[in-house]
Image: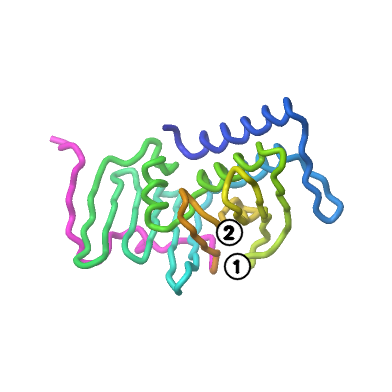
Amino acid sequence: MPAASTVLRVLAVSVVASLTVTGCQALEDTGRVIGRGDLVNELAARLDSAHELTYSAEYQLPGGRTVSIAQSRDPVRTAYTYPDGKISVSAESLATCQTTGKPVCTLTVPPTPASRPSVAVFTEAERRGMVTPPAVMGLLTTAALDPNAVIEQSDTTLAGHPATCVDVRSAEVPPFTACVTSDGVLGSFTGAVDGKPTELALSSIRDSVDDAAFDLPPGAGVVDRRPSRS
C-alpha cells in the first residue's frame, strides 16, 4: 500500500469525483459556503504537506496520558512516543519498541521512502492510541459521500496555532470531531477509529526537535531483524 500522501490524494479525488456526479453538497459556516470536495481537498493538502516540516508535538490523551511526535527533515527521521512504547523511523531502520516491563526494541527495514511513514507505521501508531492522518481522512471521506451527513466547519486555535475543525454526523461513520492546524498538523480528534473510542488534543508544538527524541529507550534490548549486510 502506498505512502500517506498517495492515500490522502486518492481519498480527496474520490470525493471530488463522486460529488461531481451526485451534486455539490455545501457546508455553511458564518456566511461562508464551501463544497464538500473542496473541504476534503483542503484538509488533505494540509495533512500531506506536514511531512515537509521539522517539528515536535505533544498530545494529551484521556486519563492524563500523553503521546508525542518528533519529525526532522535533515536528517529525515520520525519518532512516535506512547505511554507503553515508541516507534522511531530513520533511513537505517524502523524501530518498534515496547516499554512495558523491560524495554525491548525490534529493528526492521525502514519504509521507502523513509521521508513518509508507511501504512505499517500508521497501523502500529493507531494500535498504540494515536490517531493518524489516513484514519481521519478515511472517516471524513466516507461522511462526505453521505448525502444526509451534517458536516459543520469552524475555526479555532490549538497550542497557539490556528486550525480548521469539522464536526461530523453521518449514518456511515460514528460521529467525530477533528481539527487540522494551518501547517497541516493534526490538532485534535474525538470519535472512534476502527470501532474504538479515542480522543487526543494538541497540547504543545514547536518547530525544532531534540536529537534524543529519536533514541531508543534507555536500557532497551535490541532484536535486529534487518537482513545481514555482509
Is 125 magenta? The answer is no
Q: Residue at x 66, y 40 (%)?
A: 144
Is 217 magenta? The answer is yes
Q: Residues within 10 Å of mark 1 (few under 14, many from 20)?
A: some
Residue lying farthest left? 230
The span picked out in magenta is 204-230
Q: From where the camera sits, is residue 60 visible?
A: yes
Task: Tell me if label 2 and label 1 are in contact, CB under 8 Å.
Answer: yes
**Which amino acid lies under the numbered mark 1 shown in the image of this protein?**
Ala
Is 112 on the left-hand or right-hand side of 43?
Answer: left
Q: What is the tally of numbered marks visible in this picture?
A: 2
Q: Residue at x 36, y 66 (%)?
A: 83
Q: Residue at x 13, y 35 (%)?
A: 230
Q: Residue at x 79, y 42 (%)?
A: 26
Q: Quadrant of the N terminus?
A: top left
The x and y percentages for residue 85 are: 32, 61
Q: Secondary structure at mark 1?
A: loop
Which disc is residue 159 wearing? 1
Q: Quadrant of residue 142?
A: top right
**Which amino acid lies under the numbered mark 2 shown in the image of this protein?**
Gly
The x and y percentages for residue 56 are: 48, 61
